[in-house]
């Protein structure tokens, strides 16, 4: 699983393929089938909030659609059966592969400020937007510092806006380094820990004709380019935007060094083909699983593809480690995943939080991991023997997720990412890295300080 914004759409192999009809989407968005805003909501939405003297508190829950041995509706039903004080009505939205539709639906629902849905799930990059609009309720009074310590630090950082916890971690995904175990063994090399090591490993694999490509990544002018850049920059102890959401550091020396390295993989060390400038996840994945590349940066979904004998020539020959870092830096993995939110207009916040506490229990996180394929956001779940038995690969990702790093946290992220995509692409194609990043800084400052 990964991130996802529209420009990093879920690959065909993912369990998130939609099958979501236009009629279903229009209904979920609160439109008539003819497309008129303000039409009737789904029947599920019409259930009034609150409780009566003879029944439980009624709340609604909107979430993107996920596939697996269990589905969200079944899990919600189990919560309803587990107690008698709260009843949750589930509203299914399109899958994350249709993230624009999911975002549009949530914006329309939350902007009404009528309290529906009480609880929702959101892409990690929407958290600051929803909090900044006043649509997401602060959760600090419900979840103590010890509660928050159970989650990966990068996730808590991403769920925090202006010092307040405005979302609760659900599941995590992040970038990671795939490598050919057979190639590195033949070369007598260990998986690279620094970018300098990676360059040497990739060059050795190519010079000894073990692989056509040394290192593959995603340089297409799209959201995934921002994700890759976040990892390179953070691994040089740099950042695009400071936590205050106003100080732009994309043109500082660490960022320049990192983006220059990205450029050099194509034009100087030549360990990456120029084609990466037009590749997102799947075009970069295919040469790796067809045996043409030694190293690949991608998301966790690639593992299953690599182990599928129907489409992979490297079954049993792939390993995964945290991404490398620059000297004096540390590994960084761009954070992805969906997280929970509580509607600021909800009239039943206590009931909503009770539902989230149940959904966040280790037992439920383990179920999402083993039956839906969503990586837990609580570090302790990775030590559960049941996860090791059901999904040993996912268990191995704990070290990757410890370094999970969010993209710039700002309610104006949609505008910021477009600037980043454009200027990073210019830097990588034209070679004026400092100039492009300075232009990005100026434009982003105009956005975040407006």
Image (cartoon, helix red, strand yellow):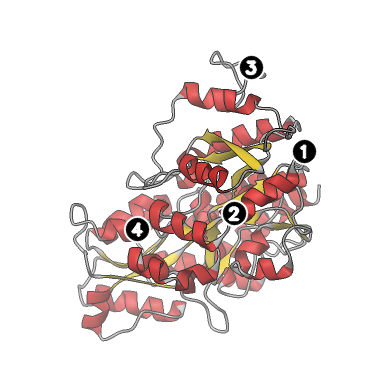
Instruction: Name the residue tied to disc 1.
Output: 347
Q: CA distance from mark 3 to mark 2?
A: 33 Å
Label 4: which residue? 302
Vertical comparison of 200 with 223: above or below: below
State the image quarter where residue 361 is shown: bottom right
Q: Residue at x 67, y 66 (%)?
A: 148
Q: Residues under labels 2 and 4: Cα distance?
A: 30 Å
Looking at the image, which residue is at 50% across and 52% down? 3
Judged from this view, the residue extending furthest toward the right is 450
**Mark 4–mark 3 distance (CA, rounded to whole Å):** 41 Å
Q: Quadrant of residue 409?
A: bottom right
Q: Residue 442's x, y, as percent?
A: 72, 55
Residue 39 tag number: 3
Q: Which mark is residue 55?
A: none
Give whichever of discs 4 and 1 has the lower sequence position.
Answer: 4
Whether 414 is drawn above or below 382: the answer is above
Question: Quadrant of the image for the N terminus?
Answer: bottom left
């Amino acid at each position: 699983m990964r991130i996802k914004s529209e420009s990093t759409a879920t690959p065909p192999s993912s369990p998130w393929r939609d099958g979501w009809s236009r009629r279903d989407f229009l209904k979920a968005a609160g439109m008539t089938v003819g497309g008129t805003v303000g039409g009737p909501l789904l029947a599920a939405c019409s259930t009034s909030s609150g409780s009566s003297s003879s029944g439980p508190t009624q709340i609604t829950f909107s979430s993107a659609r996920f596939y697996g041995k269990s589905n969200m509706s079944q899990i919600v039903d189990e919560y309803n059966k587990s107690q008698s004080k709260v009843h949750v009505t589930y509203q299914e939205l399109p899958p994350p592969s249709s993230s624009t539709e999911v975002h549009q639906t949530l914006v329309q629902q939350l902007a009404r400020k009528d309290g529906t849905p009480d609880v929702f799930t959101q892409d990690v990059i929407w958290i600051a937007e929803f909090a900044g609009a006043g649509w997401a309720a602060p959760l600090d009074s419900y979840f103590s510092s010890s509660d928050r310590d159970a989650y990966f630090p990068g996730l808590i950082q991403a769920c925090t806006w202006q010092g307040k916890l405005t979302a609760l971690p659900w599941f995590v995904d992040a970038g990671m380094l795939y490598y050919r175990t057979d190639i590195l063994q033949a070369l007598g090399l260990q998986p690279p820990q620094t970018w300098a090591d990676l360059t040497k490993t990739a060059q050795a694999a190519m010079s000894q004709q073990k692989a056509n490509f040394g290192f593959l990544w995603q340089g297409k002018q799209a959201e995934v380019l921002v994700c890759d850049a976040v990892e390179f920059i953070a691994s040089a102890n740099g950042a695009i935007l400071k936590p205050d959401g106003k100080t732009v550091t994309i043109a500082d020396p660490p960022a320049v060094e990192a983006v220059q390295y990205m450029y050099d993989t194509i034009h100087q060390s030549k360990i990456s083909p120029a084609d990466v400038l037009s590749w997102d996840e799947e075009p970069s994945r295919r040469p790796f699983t067809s045996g043409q590349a030694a190293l690949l940066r991608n998301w966790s979904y690639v593992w299953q593809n690599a182990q599928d004998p129907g489409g992979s020539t490297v079954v049993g020959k792939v390993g995964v480690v945290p991404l490398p870092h620059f000297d004096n830096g540390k590994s960084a993995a761009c954070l992805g995943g969906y997280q929970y939110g509580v509607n600021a207009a909800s009239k039943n916040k206590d009931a909503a939080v009770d539902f989230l506490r149940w959904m966040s229990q280790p037992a439920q996180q383990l179920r999402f991991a083993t039956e839906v394929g969503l990586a837990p956001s609580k570090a302790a779940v990775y030590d559960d023997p049941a996860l090791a038995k059901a999904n040993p690969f996912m268990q191995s990702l704990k070290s990757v997720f410890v370094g999970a790093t969010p993209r710039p946290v700002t309610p104006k992220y949609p505008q910021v990412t477009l600037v980043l995509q454009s200027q990073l692409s210019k830097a990588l194609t034209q070679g004026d890295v400092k100039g492009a990043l300075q232009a990005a800084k100026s434009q982003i400052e105009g956005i975040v300080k407006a």
